[in-house]
Amino acid sequence: MAKQKLKRVDLIFSKDCTCKDILAVALKRPKEEIVKDLIDSGLKGRGGAGFPTGLKWKMAMEEKSNKKYVICNADEGEPGTFKDREILDRVGLKVLGGMALASYVTGAREGFIYLRSEYKFLIPKLENLLEKFHVWMDEFDLDFKVNLFIGGGAYVCGEETSLIESMEGKRGEPRNKPPYPTNQGYLGKPTVVNNVETLVYALMIMYIGSEKFKSMGFEGSTGSKLFSVSGDTPKAGIYELELGMTLEQFVKEFGDGDAKAVQVGGASGFCVPRKRFKETHIGYQGGLEGFSLPTGGSMMIFNSSRSMYNVLHNYLDFFEEESCGQCTPCRVGCQQLLKGVEAVKRGEKSQKYLDDLLRLSDTMKLTAKCGLGQSVANSFSSIVENFREEMIY
Amino acid sequence: MAEKMIKLTIDGKVISVPEGTTLFEAAKLEKVKIPTLCYHQDLCVAGNCRVCVVEVEGWRVLPAACATPAMEGMVVFTNSPKVRRARKDVLALLVSEHSTQCTTCYRSTNCELQELAAEYNIDNEIYLNLLKDKTFTVDDSSWAIEKDETKCIRCQRCVRTCAELQKVNALDVIKKGADMKIATFFDTVMSDVVCTNCGQCINRCPTGALTERRYIDEIWEAIGDPNKHVAVQTAPAVRVALGEMLGYEPGVRVTGKMAAALKHLGFDSVLDTDFSADLTIMEEGHELIDRLKRKLVDGEDVALPMFTSCSPGWIKFIEHAYPDYLDHLSTCKSPQQMFGALLKTYYADKKKIDPKSIVSVSVMPCSAKKYEAKRIEMNDSGMQDVDYVMTTRELGHMIRQSGVNFKELKDGNFDKFMGDSTGAAVIFGATGGVMEAALRTAYEVLTGREVPFDGLKITPVRGMEGIREASIKLENVLPDFSFLEGIEVKVAIAHGLTNAAQIMDNLVIGESPYHFVEVMACPGGCIGGGGQPIPTNAEIRKARAAAIYDEDEKKVLRKSHENPDVQRIYKDFLGKPLGHKSHELLHTKYTRRERV
C-alpha cells in the first residue's frame, strides 16, 4: 500500500560511496548471488517498460554464446524526461559500474552506451570516464570494453530492438518479438539492454543490499526512482523519490497550487485529472484501473490556464512524426487521431467522432507492433476521456 | 532426431505442430485462413501490416500470427469479436491512406487490399481521408515499371523482394511517421536509379502501387490501323501462365488457345519467340565452342565462364554491379531481340511487306523486356526492332477486352517462317532450360550423338535450387573438335539475382570453375518473371515449370538444330551461326553502368 508521505531518496547521486569500492566487493561474489539479489530487490527497468532487471540478466547469463553484449540505453527521447542526461553528466562512472556488473554476470565482454544524438555535449566527458573505467577493468581483471554509439535522433530508437537495428546500421525499426534481445540481440547475440538509471540502481543495490532497497516503495514497485518534473511547477527539476506516492502528494509538493492534470510517463503516458490525484499512485503495477501508473520518470504538471486540447495536439503532432511508420496502427492511427481531433475542434466532425477515435485508440493499443506503438494512444484516450469538453469547445 | 512438437489450441481444437511453426502456419495446417498483407511466402516475415492479428488467452495484446511462434499450451482465437474488430480497424486505416479509385486501377479484382476490404465490409469511410493532404506522386518515368504512391500500403514486400531475392535494393523505406514511404535512393525517379526492371516487386505488390508500364491502347490502335502489319511473338513462358489470367488453375498450358486468341484479336502475323530461342541456342552454342577453341587451341585470353544473355534483368544487373565482367556475357541478343531484328528484315522480305509498316509486338513474361526493346543498340533492322512489349498480364487483359470466350476457343497454330519451335525452345521458360537446350545441341554438334540422358531430360540442370551445378564429359568427339576430347564441361545455373551475385562474387575472387553459366533474373526463370500473372509463389512456379517440361516431352522436335524454320533461315538468309549476317542482326554489346 501507499506510503503516507512523499519521501526523498538519495541513492543515484549520493557521494557516500565510490563506484570502484562497490565493484571491488561485488565482482568477487558469485554471479548467481548477484542475480538473486537483483531479483529479490524487485528492481524493474527504469526506462518505463518495467521489466524485472534481475530476470533479464539471468536470461542473458544462461544463454550459451561466444559473444554477448551489454547496452546502456541513453536514447532518452520521451518528451518530459531529462534524468538520464543528468545521471550521465553527474555520476557517469556509476552507470559504467552497472555495466561492469552486467558484464560480469552475463559474460559480455563488449558494451555500448547508445547516446541520444542531442546529448553529444557529453561525449568528451564520457570519453574521459571510459579511459579511467577501462583502467579499472584491467585492475579487476574483467575483460570488458565499453564504446560510445551516437544515435541518429529517432524517438523509436529508445525501443530496444529499434536501438539494436540502428546500431547494426539499419533503419531504426522495432523487430518482431520473440526472439528477445537477451536471446538474439545485437548482431544476433544475447544482449542486455538497460536504461541508464536501471544500471545505477543495479550497482547501488550491491551497496545497500536488496532488503534495504525493497523496504522502499510497495509490492511490485519497490525502491525509488528519478522523476523529471516539468510544466506548471515552481520546482522544475530532477528528484529521486520513493515509489508509491499518490499524485496528490506529488502535486502538493511540486504543483503551483492550481494543477488540473498531471501527464505521467510523457507523451506516451497517461493524463490524470485533478479528481483522480488522490487515488492514483506512481508505480509499476497495473494501468489506470489499478490506479497506479508507471513512468519512465516524466511528470508534466498542467494548471488551469492550459488547454488540454493543445496539450494533446502537441503529443499527437509528435507521434505523427516520430512513429517509425512501419506498422499500420501506429503510422496511420496517429495521423487519424491528430486529424480527427482537429476535425472535431473545427466542427467538421461531430463530437461523436471522438468515440470512434477512442475505439481506434483501443485497436492501436492492441495491435501495434512494439511497446511504443502500443502506448502512443494512451495520451489520447486519457485526455479525451477526462477533458472531452475541451476537445469540442 | 525427432522434431520437438508444440501443443496448442486453435479455435477450440487442440493440435500439435513442430517447434518454430508460426501461428499463421499452424492455422493454415488446420485449414483456417488468416488474412495477410505484408506476409509473402517468398520473403522473410515483416509483421508490419497487423492484419493477421489473433487473440491469445492471457495476452494483453493481439499478436501478429505471421510473426508469433506457437508456444506450448497457447489458446488461440483466430476469429473472435476482438480480432475481427481489430482487423477491420487496421484495414480501414489502410484504406484511409489509399487511393480508393478502384474503378480506374489496373489491379482491380486482383488486389489483396480490395479483396480484404470487401471481405471485412470496409463499406463506409469511418476515418478521414488522409490522402488529400499528401503530396504523393505517380512515377511513370521508367520504360518498364510504374510506381504509384497513392496506392502503396507500406507492406514493404517490394523492399524485401528487391533486397532478398534480387540484391538490388532499388526500393527502400524513407522518412518516418506520416511521411514514411517506399522510395528509391534519394527519391530519384525510377528511370534514373539502379533498377534491373525485373518486376519482381510488381509480382509481390498486393495492390496497384507497382505495375508494369502498359501499351495495351497503343497495340489496339496499331491493330486497328489498316496500313500497319502488326506481328506478334510470344515467349515460351507465356503459354503456361496466361491461363491464370483467364480462369485456369496454375500449370495449365494454353498454347493453342493463345495462338487462336491472338489471331482473334487481329494480329496480322502470330509468331513464336520459340523460333528465336532455338536460334539463340545455335548462336550461343557455337559461341561457347568458339570461346573454348580460342582458349584451348589458340591460347587466347578468352573470358570464361560464358554467361547467358537472354534475361534483360540480369544484363542490367551485371552492367551496374559487375561492369568489369561484361566480356563474360554471350554477345547473343535475347530471343526477343533476335526475333525483332529478323522480323523487319528476313520476315518482311519473305512476306513482301514494307518493314516500315510492320509493328513489332512481343508478349513477354517480363517487364525488363520493355526496357530491353528500347535500348539504343536494338535498332539493327534500321528502326526500333521491337515496338511494343506487353506482359502476360496485359495480354490477359486484351483477351478479356476482346470479348472472346477463351476457354471455348479451338486451338490455333503459329504462322510460318518464324513460328516453328522445338521442345528445347519451350524449356527456355524455366530456370535451367537454356542450359539444357544448349547442351542438347552443343553435345550433338561436338560428338554427333545425343546427350546421354534418358529421354533427353538433363535432370541435373532442372529444379528450383537457387544455384545448381552439373558437368558433362566429352568423349569420342568428332575430329573437328578433338581439342575438347576428354574435357569435362562444367556448367552452373542461377536464378534470382541474389544467386547470380553469389556466382559473380566467386568469379571476382577467382573461384569460378565453370565454362558456361545460365543466369535468369527471376526466381524460377521466366515462368516466375515480373510480367507473369499475380500471385506468384513456389507452388505456382513449380506448376508452370511442370507444364513447360510437359510441353517439351510432347514435342516431336526437341533439339534446336532440328527446328525447320531455323534450318531454313540459315540456308536462305543467315548462312551459318556466328556468320556475318548473324553478327549484324543477332549479336550485341553491353554498357558499363554506375552503381548508384
Image (cartoon, grey):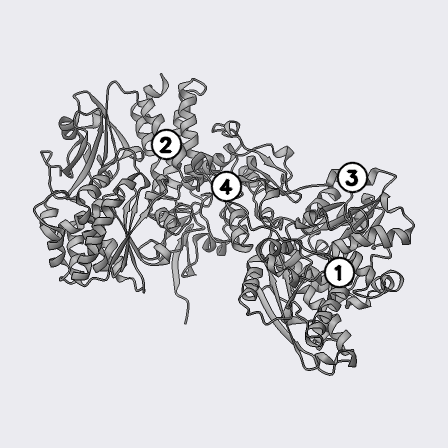
Question: Regarding mark 2 in the picture, which secondary structure is present there?
Answer: helix
Question: Regarding mark 4 in the picture, which secondary structure is present there?
Answer: loop
Are the residues flagged by discs 3 and 4 in contact, CB closer than 8 Å?
no
Q: Which numbered circle lies on residue B277?
A: 1
Chain containing mark 3: B
Front one among B308 and B263: B308
Q: Disc 4 designates what residue?
A: B154
Using the numbered discs, state the Cα–Cα distance from disc 4 to disc 2 in whole angstroms: 21 Å
Q: Which numbered circle lies on residue B220?
A: 3
Q: Disc 2 designates what residue?
A: A318
* Kind of residue indicated by mark 1: Ala
Vertical placement of residue B514 versus B7, above or below: below
- Mark 3: give few (<14), some (14-19) or many (20+) Cα within 10 Å: some
Q: In the picture, residue A295 is in which quadrant?
A: top left
* Kind of residue indicated by mark 4: Arg
Q: Position of residue A236 (x, y in %)?
A: 19, 29
Nearer the viewer's eye, disc 1 or disc 3? 1
Q: Is residue A324 left or right of residue A83?
A: right
Q: Is residue B371 left or right of residue B5?
A: right
Question: Regarding mark 1 in the picture, which secondary structure is present there?
Answer: helix
Nearer the viewer's eye, disc 3 or disc 2? 2
Are the residues flagged by discs 2 and 1 in contact, CB closer than 8 Å?
no
* Kind of residue indicated by mark 3: Trp
What count of labels does the image hold? 4
